[in-house]
Image: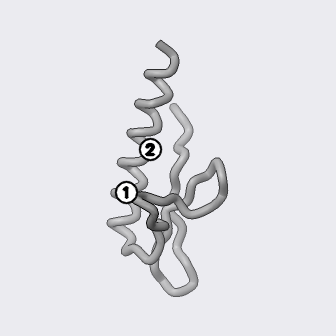
Amino acid sequence: MVEKRYEVRQERNGLWTVIDDVTGLPAASDGRDLTGLDREDARDIADVLNRDDRSKRRSSLV
């Protein structure tokens, strides 16, 4: 199984952040850090980012 680059982490305030495991920082999209999310949204966004990352890695192997 391929490692996931993006994970979710619950913050002290109870909201969720999508973390880029390569940098250890919050992931960003359109210049916005992916923080302050509800759990379901954070998981959905991480899933999409991981699918995109896997797709990019596969295409670079061809």
Across and down, in percent, residue 19 comes to 55, 60
Give the residue displayed 49% in from the left and 67% down from the top: 33
Left or right: 30 as drawn, with respect to 11: left
Judging depth in this view, the residue of 9 and 35 nearest the camera is 35
| Residue 20 location, quadrant | bottom right
Judging depth in this view, the residue of 52 and 28 nearest the camera is 28
Find residue 50 and name its label.
Answer: 2
Disc 1: which residue: 45
- Residue most extreme to the front: 31
Q: Residues within 10 Å of mark 2 (few under 14, many from 20)?
A: some
Give the residue displayed 44% in from the left and 66% down from the top: 32
Judging depth in this view, the residue of 11 and 58 nearest the camera is 58
Give the residue displayed 44% in from the left and 44% down from the top: 50
Find residue 55 and name its label.
Answer: none
Q: Residues within 10 Å of mark 1 (few under 14, many from 20)?
A: many
- Residue most extreme to the bottom: 13
Give the residue displayed 46% in from the left and 23% down from the top: 58
